[in-house]
Image (tube, rainbow, N blue to C red):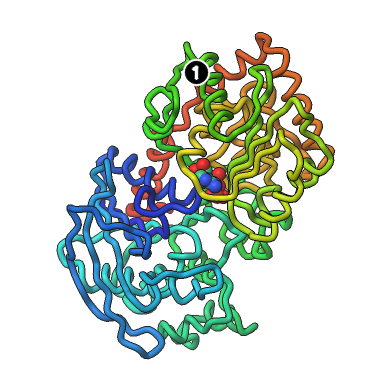
Amino acid sequence: MNVLFPIAEAYPFYKIGGLGDVGGSLPPALSKLSIDIRIALPKHPEVRLPKDAYQESSFEIIYNQEALSVNVYRAMLPESNVLTYLFEENKYLSKSTDASDNHADKFSVFSLAVATWVAEYSPYWQPQVIHCHDWHTSLIPVLLKHKHPHLDYKTIITIHNLAYQGITQTPVAKHLNLNPEECHILSWDQQDGEINIMLEGLLHASHITTVSPQYAKEILTQEYGEKIDAILQTKATTITGILNGIDTNFFNPDKDKLLFQNFSKSTWEKGKLNNRVELMKQHGINYDQHQILISFIGRVDPYQKGIGLIIQAIEDNVFPENIIFFFLGTGDPNLETELHSAAKNKPNIKIVTRFDEPLAHNLYAASHLSLIPSRFEPCGLVQMMAMRYGSLPIARKTGGLADTIIHNHDGFLFNEYNHKSMTEAIYQAIEVVKNQNKLYTTMVEKALDKDFSWKIPATEYKSLYENLILNQK
Ligand code: ADP
């Protein structure tokens, strides 16, 4: 079975968040199930081509009435046997961008390049299924349906985060030479002068998945549906929730080369303590070995991750002086400043605002507890990584957090997205850790025992691909 996997991020080529983890770890798991799966990735300016890379094809696309040259490089995803096609285009795709740049153009160009390449420039390898991810690649099913209607690819869009739909006033349909008169979805969508890129894809794809079963139900409700719940309800029978996994070889406390000290289920107490002492030393934090370490790792964004609740908790001294709270995250500059000022003159609060993969691993390994107070969480990988390294999550009961954490068994869940509910859960967790009793030890061992590998989810994707090819979905 041949599957093309166009995605905006794939670790280690490129990662900003959880999408990069999935892009780098799900394809190798599918490949182990004898699927010929190949990734299509933008050659972002940060991507370094590996030594084995070579240029496989070169062609032109027309975007906004201009001819653009596209080069496709072929390379193996490092430490895997998954072939990756890296798409280079020097006006929109492979030049440095920042948040103020127009990503609608960037990913429209990527989608056009992938759709053109697969339909016209890949004669020796053809996918049966094209598995797209988030709004970045959602135009691929639209382009294929309207520009290459004779080709019968099955298309899937996985919603990793419905909050980002790629809604834009940039007339990308016009730039792509998609004629609204030939597509009633497009003409209806554009009535308000905007185009919703993800919605276009969802309405054109053969199937939709989300990254946890709970989120698949939530997106059909007004609370989580991000204003398109009513439309999604009409597609409910073609929406499946498949829980994400993680690369349990890369995230393995027993082998992880980024850790100060490795540990296993039989050595975690000493191992975690030694990692904690070392981490505190490296960051100049005065540490006495009885102090509890709570960490946060995640994007600093105003809507999703509960940063507002964290700032309030720091300001209200929810973390007493005998608790160390270590925050690692980057994103919204104003919120980063607010975090730094809330933590000023509080030696037990450490705020690090950068992207730092080794520090993230060391924090998972060192922490007793990981705080994840998300307003919504499609799946969430942080809780899986935390549990894999024996750090118990304190998380809001939503989306994938609700699917992966069992309250008082391997973590702590709270229901309401507010200060009171989060604070109660933090204090309950602190009590459990403080007593260092059987309950704490048992909870950590249950967390360490959990299987977050791709083994089961990958078989679910495989069945979905098979059913689509057999036309049963
Ligand atoms: P999302 O995809 O919404 O950002 P996830 O929980 O699914 O959140 O995945 C976040 C991923 O990004 C995890 O691998 C986490 O360890 C990593 N991460 C987030 N922020 C940072 C950071 N500042 N430094 C290092 N890793 C980070």
What residue is at 18 percent from the left and 65 percent from the top? 55
Dividing the picture into quadrants, the one containing residue 335 is bottom right
The residue carrying mark 1 is 271
Is disc 1's CB within 8 Å of ligand 1? no
Element under label 1? helix
Dividing the picture into quadrants, the one containing residue 427 is top right
Q: Position of residue 416 (x, y in %)?
A: 79, 41
How crowded pointer 1 is (Cα within 10 Å; few <14, some 14-19, many 20+) is rated as many
As drawn, which residue projects farthest toward the bottom?
A: 65
Q: Position of residue 239 (x, y in %)?
A: 53, 53
Left/right of residue 407 with respect to residue 203 in the rendered view: right
Left/right of residue 196 with respect to residue 426 in the rendered view: left
Looking at the image, can residue 241 be seen?
no
Q: Position of residue 259 (x, y in %)?
A: 44, 29
Looking at the image, can residue 357 be seen?
yes
Dividing the picture into quadrants, the one containing residue 292 is top right
What residue is at 59 percent from the left and 49 percent from the top? 353
Q: Is residue 296 above or below residue 56?
A: above
Amino acid type, mark 1: Gly
Q: Is residue 436 above or below residue 50?
A: above
Q: Position of residue 369 (x, y in %)?
A: 64, 28
Q: Nearer the viewer, residue 292 or 191?
A: 292
As drawn, which residue projects farthest toward the top?
A: 438
Q: Nearer the viewer, residue 38 or 182?
A: 38
Q: Nearer the viewer, residue 472 or 51?
A: 51
Count of marks placed on residues: 1
What residue is at 17 percent from the left and 65 percent from the top? 56
